[in-house]
Image (tube, rainbow, N blue to C red):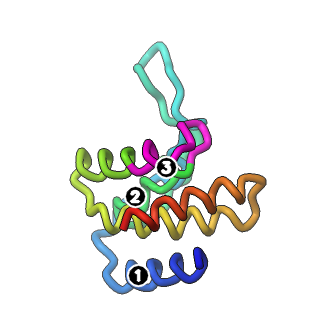
């Protein structure tokens, strides 16, 4: 079911690709550090060209944040709104990217669970 849903989202997203910009596909909890020169620093960027909505996926699958359905869905809603991004596209990219990251991961079950929660948020 998750593979089929991810593929469905990927096909729909690719067919209606938004403006491409430089995004960081490595923006997750372990790559955001408290620092002296700035309140927060992002390290270990993984630059990629894609639409803005693509870049949020690591935040929702990140193991550093509370791994519960309601907080994960709340983060998705809040960040999509506050950043002025299309929630459906953020959700679609997140489901697709979470599934992709699960194939070769010790956190496979965690990623599957996260993707399932987000699919219910449609």
Tell me the SS state at disc 1.
helix
The residue carrying mark 3 is 69
Q: What stretch is highlighted in magenta?
A: 62-73
- What residue is drawn where x is 26% and y is 57%? 85
Tell me the SS state at disc 2.
strand
Task: Select label 1 or label 2 by which is in front.
Answer: 1
Left-right relation of 43 to 122: right
Q: Where is residue 72 in the image (x, y as percent from the top left)?
A: 46, 47
Compute the Cα span from label 1 to label 3. Answer: 27 Å
Label 3 packing within 10 angstroms: few (<14), some (14-19), many (20+): some
**Nearest to N terminus: mark 2 or mark 3:** 2
Label 1 packing within 10 angstroms: few (<14), some (14-19), many (20+): few
Spot the residue most to the top: 36
**Nearest to N terminus: mark 1 or mark 3:** 1
Compute the Cα span from label 1 to label 2. Answer: 17 Å
**Nearest to N terminus: mark 1 or mark 2:** 1
Task: Select label 1 or label 3 by which is in front.
Answer: 3
Left-right relation of 108 to 40: right
Nearer to us in this view, 112 or 99: 112
Q: Where is residue 81 in the image (x, y as percent from the top left)?
A: 24, 50
Nearer to us in this view, 31 or 93: 93
- What residue is drawn where x is 49% and y is 61%? 48
Left-right relation of 46 to 82: right
- What residue is drawn where x is 36% and y is 46%? 74
Tell me the SS state at disc 3.
helix
Task: Select label 2 or label 3 by which is in front.
Answer: 3
Label annotation for residue 14: 1
Q: In which quarter of the image is residue 19?
A: bottom left
The residue carrying mark 2 is 22
């Amino acid at each position: 079911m998750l593979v089929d849903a991810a593929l469905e989202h990927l096909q729909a997203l690719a067919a209606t690709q938004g403006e491409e910009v430089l995004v960081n596909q490595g923006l997750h909890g372990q790559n955001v550090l408290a620092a002296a020169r700035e309140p927060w620093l992002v390290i270990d960027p993984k630059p990629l060209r894609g639409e803005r909505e693509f870049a949020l996926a690591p935040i929702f699958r990140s193991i550093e944040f509370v791994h519960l359905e309601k907080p994960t869905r709340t983060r998705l809603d809040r960040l999509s709104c506050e950043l002025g991004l299309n929630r459906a596209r953020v959700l679609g990219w997140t489901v697709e990217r979470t599934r992709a990251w699960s194939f070769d991961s010790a956190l496979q079950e965690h990623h599957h669970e996260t993707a399932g929660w987000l699919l219910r948020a449609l």
